[in-house]
Image: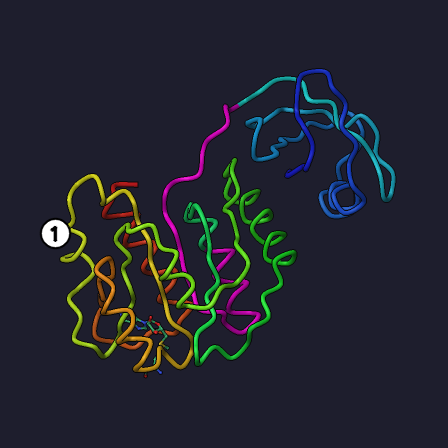
Amino acid sequence: LYLDQPLAEGREVSLPPGQAHYLGSVMRRAPGDAVLAFNGADGEWAARIASLRKDRGSLMPERQTRPQTTPRDVRLLVAALKREAMEWVVEKATELGVGSIQPVLTRRSVTDRVNLARLGLIAREAAEQSERLDLPRIAPALPLHAVLDGWDGAPLLVGAERAAAPPIARVVAGLPPDLVLSRAWLVGPEGGFERVELDDLRRRAFVSPVALGPRILRAETAAVAGLAILQALAGD
Ligand code: SAM
């Protein structure tokens, strides 16, 4: 259960209405029952439900069951996609342990609206489901050129279908070992990058176009598949 409050032994925390409803009406829990709680900072805690009404309640943390973990240095940059696709990407990327998600506005993005509050909620639920103790940082959407101009120079792997790009595994194998763990993966919008965007990407020394195979994947599939491959290649 994610709580946006400090967790410490014997320090009762109140449950917001959504969490109280979830525990009582969805999970059918009652006062005295045990739950696991985390807040992204204090690790995982075994806690008892101290009180529970329809839309409020409280928990008493009893002991820490896992120490806090820090997010891994895996960055996903994904073009702003249609709402359902974006939400699916955030859910799956969180399960896969992504450290941060940067929505990117591209010329063919079908939307420039990214609902950060909703995406944050989805990330929290995915963290709960996958027993992950930290949350990915989800940044406000930025235009592609701004992302590239502000880039820190780490290798940026860009999904480039139809571009005769080398396979992702070959490119990662050619990176210096210390950089293999600093992973950043950029995926274009439903309609792909425009030519000028691809030219801009290729001009940047830190960009490596890579392919995930000969098939054209949906943007959301490419986002999640690329992350899974990068995790596997880094051994986690
Ligand atoms: N309409 C585009 C076209 O036909 O060229 C397809 C765009 S694809 C649906 C969306 C994004 O997913 C692409 O910009 C690319 O970043 C990524 N992608 C799709 N298939 C890929 C592949 N096989 N390898 C690498 N990236 C891929």
Q: Is residue 15 left or right of residue 195?
A: right
Reply above or below: 225 against 10. Answer: below
Q: Is residue 158 left or right of residue 169?
A: right
Instruction: Report helix, strand or loop for mark 1.
Output: loop
Answer with the quadrant where ligand 1 appears in the image. bottom left
Reply above or below: 88 against 67. Answer: below
| Region rendered in magenta | 66-92
Residue 127 position in % (x across, y down): 54, 44
Amino acid at the residue labelled 1: Gly
Provide the residue designation for mark 1: 174
Residue 195 position in % (x across, y down): 30, 82
Residue 95 position in % (x across, y down): 46, 49
Please state which of residues 106 and 132 is positioned toward the viewer in this rendering.
Answer: 106
Please state which of residues 135 and 139 is positioned toward the viewer in this rendering.
Answer: 139
Q: Is residue 61 left or right of residue 161?
A: right
Residue 75 included in the magenta stretch of the image: yes
Name which quarter of the figure residue 34 lies in. Answer: top right
